[in-house]
Image (tube, grey):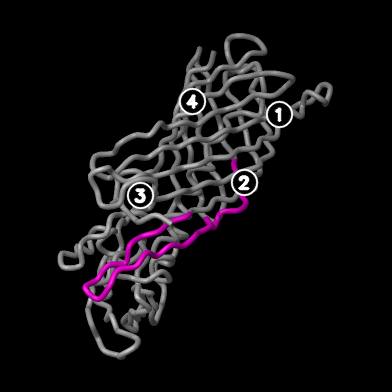
Amino acid sequence: MHTLQARLLPFLIALAALLVAPPSQAQDRDVDELGGALSGIGQQYADNYTQPITDALGANLNAGLFRTAEVGGEGVIPVIDLYVGVAGTGALTAGSSESFQLTNDVIEAGNGRQLRIEYPNTDLPTAFGENESPGSADIIDVQTDTKVDEVPLPSSLIDTPIAPLAVPQIGAGTVFGTDAQVRFLPETSISDYGSVSLFGLSVRHSISQYIPLSPVNLAVQGTWQSLSLSGSDDRINSGEIVDASGWALNAQVSKSVPVAPITFYGGLQYEQFGVDVGYTFETSAGTSTVSFEQDASNNVRALAGVSVTLAVIQLNVDYALAHNNTVSAGVGITL
């Protein structure tokens, strides 16, 4: 597992980086930066602390996957579709955990040495929780049962009712009632935070083509997406530091208004999204690599929305009910 190395970025793709911020040196720890915060806490604390970020990231990446259930015929060229646009999604954080309770963690610090991290007996904030730090934690040498260090604990990192994400996407079709959509963000350097890359592929097949005179359009779609974050070459922790992936299966329905360029659409979706993350625990008492896996809480969502096509410009907006409700809006060109 790789080391954690990024800090809070302005959008949710940066929230993925929140999971993997660089550890500050133990003698110059800044708990306002996730790296400095996590470098002095254990795996159980970090798992609870970052879970809301994983939930929001998974909810956002699996949103905005379609704008209609019609396969072929969206654009100005009959039967052939070409769509180039951007989906902006936002996960509502109202349902995210704000605090948790934990007594201690045990860290293997190398050479057979174990360190116990003792936390205060109070509610501990998640990344979307209380703004104030709960205090400090004591680092105890398990073998001698003596205190060898003390580290400050992090406050929340962001206070927002909605966590946003923007994803570029390209769709093309149709072949035998099937089209495909690609989401792609090439490896992009974001200041000194490192490099982020994203790839996703959706394949959709028309069901209504098998139903003569169907009053609505019906389709099914499968999607797989992957996100990775790599550290900057000039940082201690370079190379890939987070690996996240997920898939979604949905059933879609839509109905166009005959006298207006308006389409109402909806769907049911089953999804899974997981993150592998790791970071370096670092205090004056020892250093260790900590790693863990997380699954986003969203598994099922129901959504409804509307799209409007003006010449070659298509606009859409929808709302989804799930563990983390999401709102999605898109703009693109259809040909």
Does the CB distance between marks 1 and 3 fall below 8 Å?
A: no
Q: Which type of secondary structure does the marked residue at label 1 adopt? A: strand
All told, the count of numbered labels is: 4
Q: CA distance from mark 1 to mark 4?
A: 22 Å
> Where residue 47 sits: x, y (%)?
43, 65
Quarter of the view holding residue 96: bottom left
Q: Which residue, given by chain and number where applicable, does mark 1 sit on? A: 205
Determine whether 242 is above or below 66 in the image: below
> Where residue 132 sits: x, y (%)?
25, 69
Q: Which type of secondary structure does the marked residue at label 3 adopt? A: helix
Q: Is residue 300 left or right of residue 225?
A: right
Amino acid carrying label 3: it is Ala
Which quadrant of the rendered structure holds the N terminus?
bottom left
Determine whether 32 is above or below 11 in the image: below
Q: Which residue, given by chain and number where applicable, does mark 4 sit on? A: 315
Circle nearer the N terminus (4, 3): 3
Give the residues in magenta.
276-303
Q: Which residue, given by chain and number where applicable, does mark 3 sit on? A: 17
Query: Residue lying furthest bottom in this view?
Result: 145
> Where residue 39 sits: x, y (%)?
29, 65
In magenta segment, residue 188: no
Q: Which type of secondary structure does the marked residue at label 2 adopt? A: strand
Q: Can you tell which mark lies on residue 16?
A: none
Which quadrant of the rendered structure holds the C terminus?
top right
- Of tags 4 and 3, the one toward the viewer is 3
Q: CA distance from mark 3 to mark 2?
A: 28 Å
